[in-house]
């Protein structure tokens, strides 16, 4: 199955075509979809934080996430957060994979008890690669992404173990081209959250 996705991406046939140009600073409602790599994450244990711990969480945990995302510069096209939810969009799976691993490393390096936070906090991350609409958001007054593939990405991390990165088969297939220093292992078909069927998932890790 992975080889099938590799062939689709390589030839531009079927649902997935070659990657679109780099993410633009603005977007319009042009009705066109572009291939993007998307990461959704949340922090296990966030719902059990006390009110007084929330400023510490924002400053140290979300602050660390923000620092990592900043390092990816113009390869990062969109980022948003609500509570412990983290959504980021990058222009290709290889960049997104390195970003995801950097996020996990940054959070794991935090001495949470020394920062006044419980050591049970752990980041869960899922990645997907697919076509989405990039349009001006009339509510946020900036460009945003819309589409079923964005929703599919959000259904990954709730069912995955923390402290790891798991990606879909299209994401892994894109990595199969030229991703030095990255490796992925097939873990099987995993039921997605909220009844979104099942997805063939891969565990992402730094290569040898």
Image (cartoon, grey):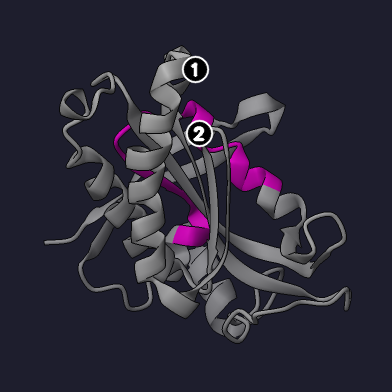
Q: Which mark is residue 68?
A: none
Label 1, label 2: how far apart the Cα atoms are: 9 Å
Q: Quadrant of residue 191?
A: top right
Q: What residue is drawn where x is 77% and y is 55%?
A: 147
The percent coordinates of residue 58 (x first, y second) are 43, 37
- Is residue 157 rendered magenta in the image? yes
Query: Is 31 located above or below residue 207 in the figure?
Result: below
| Residue placed furthest toward the left | 208
Q: Are marks 1 and 2 in contact (CB under 8 Å)?
A: yes
Q: Left or right? Give the position of 61 relative to 20.
A: left
- What segment is highlighted magenta in the picture? 151-171
* Earlier residue among tags 1 and 2: 1
Query: Is 156 located above or below residue 36 in the figure?
Result: above
The percent coordinates of residue 141 (x first, y second) are 80, 64
In the image, 75 versus 170, the foreground residue is 75
Q: Quadrant of residue 165?
A: top left
Q: Left or right? Give the position of 11 relative to 31.
A: left
Q: What residue is drawn where x is 30% and y is 73%?
A: 179
The percent coordinates of residue 40 (x first, y second) are 53, 46
Q: Secondary structure at mark 2?
A: loop
Q: Residues within 10 Å of mark 2 (few under 14, many from 20)?
A: some
In the image, 135 versus 159, the foreground residue is 135
Q: Which residue is mark 2?
A: 84
Q: Which residue is mark 1?
A: 47
Q: Quadrant of residue 120?
A: top left
Q: What residue is drawn where x is 61% and y is 28%?
A: 193
Q: Residues within 10 Å of mark 1 (few under 14, many from 20)?
A: few
| Residue placed furthest toward the bottom | 21
């Amino acid at each position: 199955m992975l080889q099938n996705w590799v062939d689709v991406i390589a030839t531009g046939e079927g649902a997935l075509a070659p990657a679109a140009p780099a993410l633009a600073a603005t977007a319009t409602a042009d009705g066109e979809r572009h291939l993007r790599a998307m990461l959704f994450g949340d922090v296990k244990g966030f719902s059990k934080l006390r009110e007084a711990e929330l400023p510490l969480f924002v400053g140290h945990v979300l602050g660390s996430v923000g620092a990592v995302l900043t390092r990816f510069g113009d390869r990062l096209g969109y980022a948003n957060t609500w509570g412990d939810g983290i959504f980021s969009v990058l222009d290709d799976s290889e960049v997104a994979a390195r970003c995801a691993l950097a996020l996990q490393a940054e959070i794991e390096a935090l001495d949470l008890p020394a920062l006044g936070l419980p050591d049970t906090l752990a980041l869960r991350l899922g990645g997907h690669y697919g076509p989405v609409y990039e349009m001006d958001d009339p509510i946020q007054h900036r460009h945003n992404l819309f589409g079923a593939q964005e929703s599919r990405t959000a259904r990954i991390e709730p069912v995955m173990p923390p402290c790891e990165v798991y990606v879909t088969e299209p994401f892994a297939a894109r990595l199969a081209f030229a991703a030095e220093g990255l490796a992925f292992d097939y873990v099987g078909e995993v039921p997605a959250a909220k009844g979104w069927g099942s997805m063939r998932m891969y565990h992402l890790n730094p290569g040898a």
